[in-house]
Every structure is written in structure tokens, then in C-alpha cells.
Amino acid sequence: MNRTALIALFFALVLLVGCADVPEQEEVWEMEQESVAVFSDGETVDLWRARKGELRGSVAWYELSDGTVLLLEDDAAGPENPGFLSEGAWAAIESGYRTVGLRYDIKALLDQAYTAYRNCQAEGWEYEPGRVGQSTALTASNEKVVWFCTTVNLTLDPANGQETRLTAVFDRETGEPLEIWSLFTAGETEVRAKLAAIGEGGFRAELAAALDPERIVFYPEYLEVHFPAGTVAGQTQELILQWDYDQLGGLLQPWAVPEGTEAAE
């Protein structure tokens, strides 16, 4: 699908801001970077962005030389200061996120999107552009700790979107990052075993070993443990386990229980 086919929807959803009496502005397309990627067959993809007056589009458009939109990339959103952090703590948290940057590889995604595009050409199908973006927001807090979660939304196949959630935890006073395992009263091995237990199915050693601590997401009332598809052999879909804090039986340090839970009251 080319830019012309997508332009009306784009401005309706992305650039619809301001007051009704603002004069209509002519849209302008600017190439921000030429040849962002060069594929094995010599085809290149350029990065474009739309402007309307002073309004800057919040989506980057990756286009092939024939104008085909290969991939859309939403500008990263957040994190934002929740308002209760000190200037120093917030500066440390914000600096950490700037250092980490995007949690996906745009060059690798362009390669995947181009492969999908070529497959569509070979089969005589219309290609639908993929889309990716990430946002970071506060998910929980207490007097000692704040939790943020970065969510990456990826849709290379329009019928199969993927959402990845990645947790980071910080000291509320200083903004220094804390290791996830330090929030628990038991050792890492025991914590992994508890969080990988599936109802009456019980403990699964292979899940416990593969558990990524960034995928333990804290909310005020519960925590979630995410196992992406393919974490273990034969797992074709994402597995999400949810634990109320009182189900953890004191596994969390008292100072690491988010506010808003019975255990914290």
C-alpha cells in the first residue's frame, strides 16, 4: 500500500489537533533520511515524515523507491514524571531510559517487512504495511519503589500483532535502578520456581529457567509473569501468569509491595 492510500487516515488519527478556527495548512512531506536500509537485492528504503503547518507527524514512514509504504514507526512515548518524584530521582530515571533507547531493532524489522512484501508480490497479494511503536508508563509505586513498564507494539502481519512488556524498577528516593530479584525475600532459584508454577499443573523447571525478570510486571493489585511464545519447546502462544500479592506468601520484601494492595495496607 502506498502513501497516497494511507494519507487521509494518517492525518485524521495523528495530526488532528488544535482549534476549529485554525486555518487549513497544506501538508508537506519531508525525507528525513535517505537509504535507511539497503536490502540484498539493492532496493533501498527511505524515511519520510509529514508536516502540516507547525504540526509534525508523530509517525515515521519507511518507503521503498516506488512509494510503497513498508513500515510505520510511531514515535516513542514516555516515560513521564508522575509528579511525586524528586527532581534528582526523575533525572536519573529519565537518563536511564534515554541510554537504553528503543527496545526493538528497526533495521531487523525493515528486513522482515521487506521479505513479507516480496512474498506478497510473488503471490499476487496486496501488501499491508507493518507498524511498530513503544511507550513507557508508571505501573505501580510505594514509599520506597517505583515500577515502570515499556510496552512494544509490533504488527508485521496485520492479523497477528505482538505486545511485549518490559519492567524496570527504581528506588523512589534516588531514581537508581534496582535488580528485580532484590525485591524478593527468597533466592532467585526459589522465586523462579514459584512464579513459573501453573495452577494445579505445578512447577515447570523449563519455564523457571527461561523466565526473564524484565517480564515480571507489577501492578497495584497483582503481578504478571510473561512467557513469550517459544520460550519453551512446543509453546506456540504467549503464556501470562497472574499472581495476587497475598498468593505469594511473603515472597516479596515488605518494602517492595506496591501501594493499593491488601498486603500493603
Image (cartoon, helix red, strand yellow):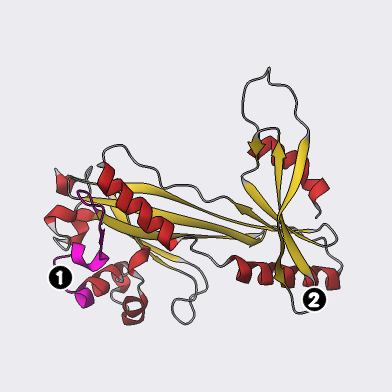
In the displayed structure, 55 sits above or below 49; it is above
Question: Is the residue 32 above or below the residue 105 in the image?
Answer: above
Label 2: how many Cα within 10 Å (few below 14, some 14–19, many 20+): few
Q: Tell me the tag on residue 186.
A: 1
Q: Is 219 rendered above or below residue 126? A: above
User: Residue shown at 67%/71% (left/top)?
Assistant: 112
Mark 1 lies on a secondary structure that is loop
The answer to whether any part of residue 141 appears in the image is yes
Tell me how far mark 2 sits from mark 1, CA to CA: 54 Å
The structure residue drawn at horizontal position 84% and vertical position 69%, both measured from the top left corner, is 121
Residue 128 on the magenta segment:
no
Q: How many neighbours does mark 1 have within 10 angstroms: few (below 14), some (14-19), or many (20 or more)? A: some
Q: Nearer the viewer, residue 59 or 125?
A: 59
Q: Residue 103 bears which disc, if any? A: none
Magenta highlight range: 171-190
Q: Looking at numbered disc 1 in the image, what kind of residue is underneath it? A: Ala
Q: Position of residue 42 (x, y in %)?
A: 80, 76
The residue that disc 2 covers is: 42
x and y, in percent, of residue 166 in the image: 40, 61
